Amino acid sequence: MATETPLPLKGLKVIDVATVIAGPTLAMHLGDFGADVLKIEHPRGDVLRVTGYQKDGVGLWYKMANRNKRGITLNFSKNKGQALFKKLVMDADVLIENFRTGTMEKWGLGWEDLRAINPKLVMVRLTGFGQTGPYKNRPGFGTIAEVFSGFAHITGDEDGPPTLPNFGLADCIAASYGASAVMYALYHRDVQGGEGQFIDLSIYEPIFQVLGPQPLQYDQLGVVQHRMGNRSKNNAPRNTYETRDGQWVAISTNAPAIVTRVLTLCGGPEVSSDPRFSTPQSRVEHIDEVDGIVARWVKARNLDEVLAKFEEAEAAIGPAYDIAQIFKDPQYQARNDIVTVEDEDLGPLKMANAFPFLSETPAKIRHSGQRLGQSNEEVYRELGLSADDLAKLKDDGVI
């Protein structure tokens, strides 16, 4: 009988006391790859349980962001809650929290307090603006990070307002950076013989870095990037184009060979050899003409024909999918990008798989987010508490 391949983070103990999106998503990444993640919520529950779409009163986003976690409740504002939390931290590898700066210290659960009882602890402190600086005490969420980082300023139509994404973009970018940082800290601890450390992770800085060389461009050239819709200052054609049957595609031409193929396909050899379109900068200078050539060609054809012609020409194109189209696409199906997970409340759920795919130790979604306090008895019994102890703690508002 074949044995199941162990997940790469098996044995790693993670405590997630964060709420909403960024922190829980960071912990989700670790749990997907095998970490034993303990999700601790206030007895009222994480607000993500009632955020966004719900079915039968069950929050769907919570089910995904808190998959592969054991869920318990604990009130840190109670002395008994703080004592229980310290017991849980004693043998933890990683702690993820996103309370306002200074809140954990107020409860006697700050970095210095926790490292004293567990010098090997890696603690992620995730806030809107970080642990230092004049804004450290400000409340901050992904939306604030998206404007503060400069993202919204360069996003949207040229004559329109700064544009925000309608999903947790900055939060999820911060979560990915945070998961990487945890691995760096664990490598330092476990391979280089170091101690634990705390990770100061703001939400705004990761998305600020993702925006690319804007600081360098401003420093060296005084360039301030502005909104220009779906176009780019770096190259052309790069835009979205509508097909005859009312669908949309995006075209990108970052390589010279791709540019030649696209312009030859859409305008003929005379267009692809036109000196006005010979370099990225010259095409940007004639962007209306370049876009017009491609837009007219795409508009004269249905989506299937446009995609087929581009594939034949080995040129880069992608359809602007909605989620219903994604469910039907053979690429998504072939790579098992959407998986079915059994859920105790809602039955089978389809959600995005765990990425990326590791060849030898791939991630696995073992279960969706649990009910509030579902693992209380299991976890607290591991600490030596009895059924009577748990009942008393519940009556006292501790769990």
Image (spheres, rainbow, N blue to C red):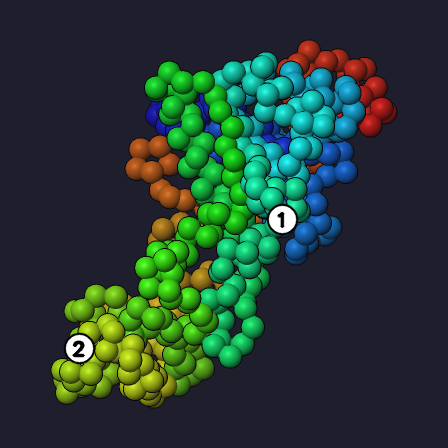
In the image, 74 versus 369, the foreground residue is: 74
- In the image, what residue occupies the spot 48% across and 38% down? 178
In this rendering, position of residue 186 left or right of residue 73: left
The quadrant holding residue 222 is bottom left
Residue at the top extreme?
A: 384
Q: Is residue 314 visible?
A: no
Kindly identify which residue carries mark 1.
140
Examine the image and state in which quarter residue 7 appears.
top left
The number of numbered discs placed on residues in the rendered structure image is 2
Question: Disc 1 and disc 2: Cα gap in Å?
Answer: 46 Å
**Which class describes the residues within 10 Å of circle 2: few (<14), some (14-19), or many (20+)?**
some
* Quadrant occupied by the C terminus: top right
35 sits to left or right of 220: right
Amino acid identity at mark 2: Ser
Q: Position of residue 203 (x, y in %)?
A: 54, 46
Q: Is residue 137 visible?
A: yes
| Disc nearer the start of the sequence (1/2) | 1
Q: In what quadrant of the picture does the N terminus appear?
A: top left
Label 1 residue SS: loop
Cβ atoms at labels 1 and 2 below 8 Å apart:
no
**Residue shown at 53%/32% (left/top)?**
124
Q: Which residue does the image show at 35% across and 32% down from the upper left?
A: 361
Q: Which residue is mark 2?
A: 278
> Is 279 or 219 nearer to us in this picture?
219
